[in-house]
């Protein structure tokens, strides 16, 4: 009987001690979070909710865009839709949005030189550079003078394309208000010299 009483007392003390001691929840025992507790802070959107982010990439990096113009030719337009370039054609600006450009000047030249179609979409605007395979090597603006270095092959569709190409390239640099003078080189020769060989 004494033994039962001792066991009973030990059990009673054990239960009383357990009931009075606050229990810390372990990771497995934490109560489920409410919807408001699960929401990430505004500057930390989970990657599952941001399809553009990838592991290890901060979601705060955004794509930078800039607006530039490329210049194309309205054939036999006589200056009606753009600047008359003296060949019976007009020089027409087309707005383009560029993602992550190094500089607007390089972005504009890269965009123009990447266009390989004879005509721009359904606009009917002619690209006199479509036969050429030119790449921008370097472009700088210093004290209002833009110096542009192109490499590759310059191929034209006829004598009239000389003036069209010259206008397309020069206007691409002159679109920027900081540019007062333009010098373009093709494979180390001035643009005029390169065009005179065609």
Image (cartoon, rainbow, N blue to C red):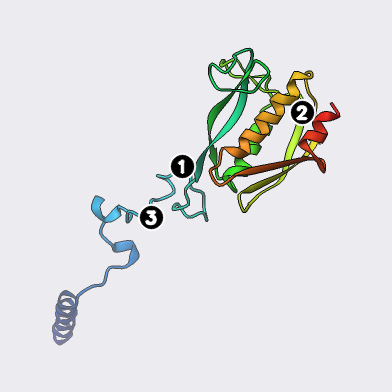
Find numbered disc 3 in the image and state the secondary structure of the residue it sits on. loop
Mark on residue 5? Answer: none
Q: Mark 3 sits on what residue?
A: 44
Question: Left of 62 or right of it: where is 20?
Answer: left
Q: Quadrant of the C terminus?
A: top right
Q: Quadrant of the N terminus?
A: bottom left
**Spot occupied by residue 103 in the image (x, y as percentages of width and height):** 59, 47
- Callout 2–callout 1 Cβ contact below 8 Å: no
Category of crowding for the residue at label 2, using alpha-carbon neighbours closer than 10 angstroms: few (below 14), some (14–19), many (at least 20): some
Query: Would you identify the image quadrant in which residue 30 lies?
Result: bottom left
The tag earlier along the polypeptide, 2 or 1, is 1
The tag earlier along the polypeptide, 3 or 2, is 3
Question: Left of 170 or right of it: where is 198?
Answer: right
Category of crowding for the residue at label 1, using alpha-carbon neighbours closer than 10 angstroms: few (below 14), some (14–19), many (at least 20): few
Residue placed most toward the observer, 37 or 142: 142
Callout in the foreground (3, 2): 2
Furthest residue in direction top, as rendered: 76
Residue under the point 60% across and 15% down: 78
* Mark 3–mark 2 distance (CA, rounded to whole Å): 47 Å
**Spot occupied by residue 190 in the image (x, y as percentages of width and height):** 79, 39
Task: Count the numbered circles shown.
Answer: 3
Residue placed most toward the observer, 35 or 143: 143
* Mark 2–mark 1 distance (CA, rounded to whole Å): 38 Å
**Spot occupied by residue 19 in the image (x, y as percentages of width and height):** 16, 74
Residue placed most toward the observer, 73 or 110: 73
Q: Mark 2 sits on what residue?
A: 132
Mark on residue 51? Answer: 1
Residue 5 to residue 123: above or below: below
Residue under the point 40% across and 44% down: 49
Residue 198 to residue 34: above or below: above
Find numbered disc 2 in the image and state the secondary structure of the residue it sits on. loop
């Amino acid at each position: 009987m004494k033994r039962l009483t001792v066991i009973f007392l030990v059990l009673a003390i054990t239960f009383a001690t357990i009931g009075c001691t606050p229990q810390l929840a372990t990771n497995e025992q934490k109560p489920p979070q409410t919807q408001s507790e699960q929401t990430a802070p505004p500057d930390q959107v989970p990657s599952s909710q941001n399809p553009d982010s990838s592991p290890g990439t901060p979601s705060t990096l955004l794509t930078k865009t800039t607006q530039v113009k490329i210049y194309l030719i309205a054939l036999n337009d006589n200056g009606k839709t753009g600047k008359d370039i003296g060949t019976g054609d007009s020089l027409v600006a087309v707005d383009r949005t560029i993602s992550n450009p190094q500089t607007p000047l390089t972005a504009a030249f890269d965009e123009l030189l990447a266009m390989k179609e004879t005509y721009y979409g359904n606009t009917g605007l002619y690209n006199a550079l479509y036969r050429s395979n030119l790449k921008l090597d370097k472009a700088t603006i210093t004290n209002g003078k833009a110096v542009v270095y192109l490499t590759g092959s310059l191929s034209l569709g006829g004598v009239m394309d000389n003036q069209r190409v010259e206008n397309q390239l020069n206007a691409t640099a002159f679109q920027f208000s900081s540019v007062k003078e333009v010098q373009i080189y093709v494979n180390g020769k001035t643009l005029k010299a390169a065009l005179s060989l065609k």
